[in-house]
């Protein structure tokens, strides 16, 4: 290892405390009731690790410049965190994740150029950090562009894309091995460029409905890059923190892939098979049944059981508190109410859980897909607020659909279905939803918050 500095005992103990705080943070964030505490524990651990570094005895070059950039980064992070809307949270996560991967890659490059070493393990971990970090960076940027809809959310398949991606992957591996065997600076820069290119090619074929899984996977990759950079820098805490992020991200990715009902390889490389075309049109030339807020209120008021299905449209309209008000009103009338939460509803894992937690929705009313699906057939009315792909039967029947094979909420089994939508525009996956044309489906067009407010007002008179 290039770093021969030995940390004082108090520094090592401080790093141990920070590592324990990171572990407790992950544990606490496994439950909505303790998630806030988990975030605070993680923040305290990160702050402790950062402050201790400045007093650890390591000679820091350009200290003033470091402090300036720490201050600038802190201000940017604080402003972004306070101003970001819940609808843009996935994009922010993608950007922050990309920054982490890119930072790890650049640190490894600088460490190699400035310090250098012929140590085999140092070279191996440097190569791993550069490759994984650069892939995570460029892949996260493409993910951000998809989520922000600055580019198409549908799979992008370039001519000969499969073979170009394979060629770049092979070249990256060969370049990494070459750098380990025969260290040369130009190889390091070439490896960085190949990693960035592979990250773009890696994410482009992923369809919008699968982007949440890719976010989780890239997060795991960033964790691995940070762990590898921990060895390069001789920093045990980075090694621990990166390993925790990599392991938790990998587990989450596997869980989400199972929730989508297909192997991870299908999610990442399915576009290359040419079977990603979605349904045609927007449905504008087909008749649908629309209604008024008063009619929807009457429908809900005379039901015995109602299930609410929140989606991305709820987040866009910031209507979670109004939905909670509707649920409370229905409960007061003796109507059984539950929320159906799909694992990938919204744009990232847990998006709907966080959104509803903001409105103080009781946690026991939030039911996951496997628990709620058997109840739809005994439900009088399902109210879908801004969701589309997670209730689309094309996932069961249309083999050409990008969401084919994904388990969905069985809202079509209910007696009556009410859809709150702005328009007939397809969901994030870009395909038509046949439920909208079902005779038992009623559409209420307009902004979700405005529509729910009108329904609540009308329901008070039912």
Image (spheres, rainbow, N blue to C red):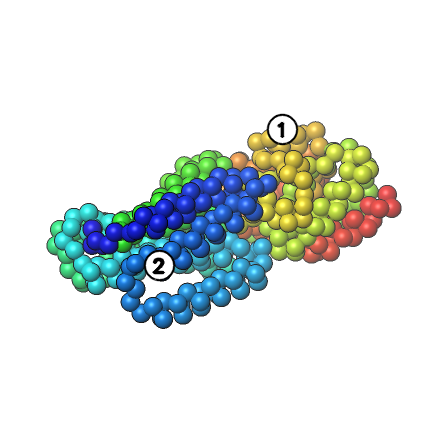
Q: Viewer-nearest of labels 2 and 1?
A: 2
- Residue 173, image x and y in percent? 22, 49
| Left/right of residue 176 with respect to residue 265 in the rendered view | left
Q: Quadrant of residue 423?
A: bottom right
343 vs 45: above or below = above
| Left/right of residue 163 with respect to residue 136 in the rendered view | left
- Residue 207, image x and y in percent? 46, 49
In this view, which residue lies farthest toward the right?
Answer: 461
Residue at 58% over, 58% down: 85
Name which of mark 2 and mark 1 comes first in the sequence.
2
Residue 119 appears in the figure: yes
| Left/right of residue 105 with respect to residue 314 in the rendered view | left
Question: Callout 2 environment at 10 Å: few (<14), some (14 to 19), or many (20+)?
Answer: few
7 vs 64: above or below = above
- Residue 190, image x and y in percent? 22, 60
SS type, badge 1: helix
Question: Callout 1 environment at 10 Å: few (<14), some (14 to 19), or many (20+)?
Answer: few
Query: Split into 4 quadrants, where in the image is the C terminus?
Result: top right
Q: How many marks?
A: 2
Residue 172 appears in the figure: no
| Left/right of residue 407 with respect to residue 262 in the rendered view | right
Say which of 210 and 395 sits in front. Answer: 210
Q: Distance between the residues labelled 2 and 1?
A: 58 Å
* Residue, disc 1: 374
- Residue 344, image x and y in percent? 53, 43
SS type, badge 2: loop
* Residue, disc 2: 55
Residue at 40% over, 58% down: 51
Say which of 123 and 95 sits in front. Answer: 123
Say which of 144 and 205 sits in front. Answer: 144
Residue at 61% over, 43% down: 434
């Amino acid at each position: 290892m290039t770093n021969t500095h030995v940390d004082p005992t108090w520094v090592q103990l401080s790093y141990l405390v920070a590592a324990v705080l990171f572990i407790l943070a992950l544990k606490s964030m496994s439950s909505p009731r303790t998630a806030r505490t988990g975030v605070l524990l993680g923040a305290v651990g990160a702050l402790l690790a950062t402050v201790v570094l400045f007093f650890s005895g390591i000679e820091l070059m350009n200290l003033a410049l470091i402090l300036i950039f720490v201050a600038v980064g802190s201000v940017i992070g604080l402003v972004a965190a306070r101003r970001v809307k819940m609808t843009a949270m996935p994009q922010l996560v993608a950007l922050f994740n990309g920054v982490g991967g890119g930072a790890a890659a650049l640190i490894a490059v600088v460490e190699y150029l400035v310090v250098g070493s012929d140590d085999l393990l140092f070279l191996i971990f440097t190569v791993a950090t550069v490759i994984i970090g650069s892939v995570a960076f460029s892949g996260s940027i493409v993910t951000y562009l998809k989520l922000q809809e600055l580019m198409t959310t549908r799979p992008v398949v370039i001519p000969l894309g499969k073979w170009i991606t394979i060629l770049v992957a092979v070249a990256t591996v060969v370049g990494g091995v070459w750098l380990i065997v025969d260290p040369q600076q130009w190889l390091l820069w070439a490896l960085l460029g190949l990693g960035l290119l592979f990250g773009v090619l890696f994410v482009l074929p992923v369809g919008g409905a699968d982007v949440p899984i890719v976010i989780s996977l890239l997060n795991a990759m960033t964790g691995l890059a940070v762990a590898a950079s921990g060895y390069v820098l001789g920093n045990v805490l980075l090694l621990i923190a990166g390993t925790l992020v990599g392991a938790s991200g990998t587990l989450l990715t596997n869980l989400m892939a199972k929730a989508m009902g297909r192997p991870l390889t299908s999610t990442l490389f399915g576009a290359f098979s040419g079977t990603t075309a979605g349904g045609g049109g927007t449905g504008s030339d087909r008749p649908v049944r629309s209604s008024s807020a008063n009619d929807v209120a009457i429908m809900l008021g005379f039901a015995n059981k109602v299930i609410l299905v929140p989606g991305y449209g709820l987040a866009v309209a910031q209507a979670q508190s109004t939905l909670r008000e509707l649920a409370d009103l229905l409960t007061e009338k003796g109507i059984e109410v539950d929320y159906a939460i799909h694992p990938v509803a919204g744009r990232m894992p847990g998006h709907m859980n966080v959104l509803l937690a903001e409105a103080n929705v009781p946690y026991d009313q939030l039911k996951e897909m496997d628990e709620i699906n058997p109840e739809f057939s005994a439900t009088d009315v399902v109210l879908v607020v801004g969701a589309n792909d997670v209730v689309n039967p094309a996932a069961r029947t249309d083999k050409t659909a990008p969401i084919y094979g994904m388990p969905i909420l069985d809202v079509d089994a209910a007696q009556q279905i009410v859809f709150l939508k702005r328009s007939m525009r397809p969901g994030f996956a870009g395909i038509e939803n046949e439920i909208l044309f079902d005779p038992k489906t009623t559409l209420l067009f307009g902004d979700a918050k405005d529509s729910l407010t009108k329904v609540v007002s009308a329901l008070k008179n039912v």
